[in-house]
Amino acid sequence: MGVLPYIGGLGLITLTVYIMVVGRDLIVPFLISVVIWYLINTLSDYYYKIKIGAFRFPKALCFITSLITTIVAIYLIVEMIGNNIADVRAAAPVYQENLLNLSDRVFNLLGIENQPNLSQLIGQIDLRPFISNIAGTMASIAGNAGLILIYVLFLFLEQASFSPKLEALLNGSKHSGTVQEIIHTIHEKIETYVAIKTFVSILTGTACYFVLLMNDVDYASFWAFIIFLLNYIPTVGSMLAVLFPALLSLVQFPTFTPFLIVLTSLVCIQVAVGNILEPKLMGNSLNLSPLVVMLSLAIWGSIWGVAGMFLSVPFTVILMIIFSEFPKTRPIAILLSQNGKIGTSKK
């Protein structure tokens, strides 16, 4: 009889994963809308914390300002990406010519006499599947934009009734205090993570922008935004953030010097901010094992793709907090933690 609960739990986990994979097209847009809704509310809370003497802005004004800020930011991002994609297409022939010249120089330095014909090699590469995937992804995002907007709207309409519904649901329950404490802890930790991660991502993107600008790398603002965005993906994002603009500098210029300068500078920025500043700011607020972070990145990424990579850390933090509150799942929370020290809401 003691084995049956574990079999039931394993079956429930399997069913949950199956639903997440099969229902990806419906679940991911909803999660994106939840993230947007949460960011607007978090930004509104930060606006409300601003004080000028004894004066504090009304909550309604803070919310409207936060909403306008988010809309303007999304518009500028979409506009910038659209403009830069057109520019990259126009500059592609120049990049290809520089790439061919660099390959010839490399072969000459290596003393290779019978140089392979890179032009023929490039001509044999079929880019149609790659372009189709990109077009499909863009079409999916555009198609889901309306659905995401509707989700966000209904989340705001339901927002005022969240707390009364929860209180009515837990009315008279002995677990009422525990559930409220779990929700508060989750909100506190996720808000801290989002705030610190956003700050260090802005700092990293700004520093990288000036490096790219001083080295005359094309589309510096676009790559700075990509670096800012990729920094939300643990470990792998920082590597890609360095790789993409460095490769652009390799094909943009006819010599290796700008590539080496850009690569070295971006790596130094990522190490200084990501490995020194961020851990000091974050401290033990998340208390997640680095191995668990990498595993969660791989698992959520395989289930929901890029969206899962961005959400991997918040999801894992939420699971660890919930697991820590129940005796049967507390060992799992300990394994997920960095130092084995986890707190609970129970006194």
Image (cartoon, rainbow, N blue to C red):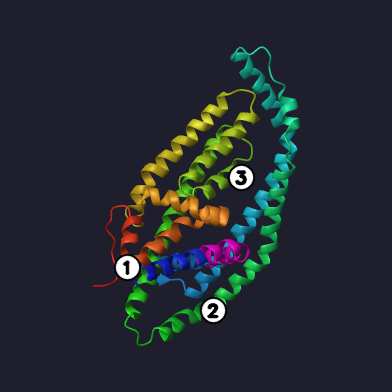
Q: CA distance from mark 2 to mark 3?
A: 36 Å
Label 2 or label 3, whichever comes before in sequence order: 2
Label 1 or label 2, whichever comes before in sequence order: 2
Q: Are marks 1 and 3 in contact (CB under 8 Å)?
A: no
Label 2 sits on residue: 158
Magenta segment boundaries in residue numbering:
16-37
- Is residue 43 in view? yes
Q: Is residue 21 magenta?
A: yes
**194 or 50: nearer the eye?**
194
Mark 2 Cα shell of 10 Å, populated few (<14), some (14-19), many (≥20): few
* Residue at 28% from the left image edge and 64% from the top image edge: 343
Mark 1 Cα shell of 10 Å, populated few (<14), some (14-19), many (≥20): few
Question: Within the image, what quadrant is residue 180 found in?
Answer: bottom left
Q: Secondary structure at mark 1?
A: loop
The circle on residue 109 is none
Question: Within the image, what quadrant is residue 196 found in?
Answer: bottom left
Q: CA distance from mark 1 to mark 2?
A: 33 Å
Label 3 sits on residue: 222
